[in-house]
Amino acid sequence: MAEESTPYVLKMRNTTTSAPPKPKHEWIVIVPDHEDVLDKRMAVRPSHLKNLTPKVEDGFWMMGGAILSEPISDPQKPQITGSVMLAVAESKEDVIRQLKDDIYFKSGVWDWDRVQVHPFKSAFRKNTEGV
């Protein structure tokens, strides 16, 4: 009786190595608006918020909101003068890339000549629901 031959299968281990992930840092971002762009800002705001959502969910944007010239007394007419955000990213360039992909940048709401991106270290963070 003839013996059945069993094919020999060599299993290779994946030996590729990857570099450890680069450390991430906090970045505080201050972006003033151009003068007299509130109507434009409010028109593109739904797109701005929709496009931010994935980056909020993945932890890139930790906080963000409008800079006001005064507290809101009429919710229909907030006196918005810019934006402030807190990012967690490997580099300032990563933050700038995200800003330039935003509809506020693309539509001319933000005054790019006055943008500020600074390394930052939170001392504390607190939930601000209800404010």
Image: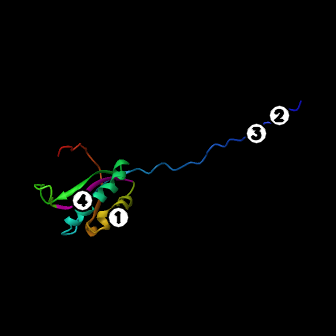
Where is residue 6 drawn, in percent x and y?
Answer: 78, 36
What is the residue that sits farthest to the right in this orientation? 1
What range is drawn magenta here?
80-89
Q: Which residue is mark 1?
A: 100
Helix, strand or loop status at disc 1: helix
| Residue at x-position 14% and y-position 55% | 75
Query: Do the residues under discs 1 and 3 have CB atoms within 8 angstroms?
Result: no
Q: List x then y, in percent, for residue 25.
A: 35, 51
- Checking the image for residue 84, the label placed there is none
Residue occupying the point 35% across, 58% down: 95
Image side of residue 68 versus residue 43, left or right: left
- For the residues labelled 4 and 1, the Cα–Cα distance comes to 14 Å
Task: Identify residue for label 2.
Answer: 4
Magenta stretch: includes residue 52: no
* View extreme (left): residue: 73
Where is residue 77 shown, x and y percent of the image? 14, 60
In the rendered image of this protein, does residue 10 appear above or below residue 86? above
Task: Give the left or right position of residue 68, taking residue 60 as reference.
Answer: left
Query: Is 85 included in the stretch rendered in magenta?
Result: yes
Residue type pointed to by label 3: Tyr
Residue at numbered disc 4: 83
Q: SS of the residue at dot 2?
A: loop
Sort mark 3 into few (<14), some (14-19) or many (20+) by Cα contacts within 10 Å. few
Of badges 1 and 2, the one in the foreground is: 2
Label 1 to label 2: alpha-carbon separation: 65 Å
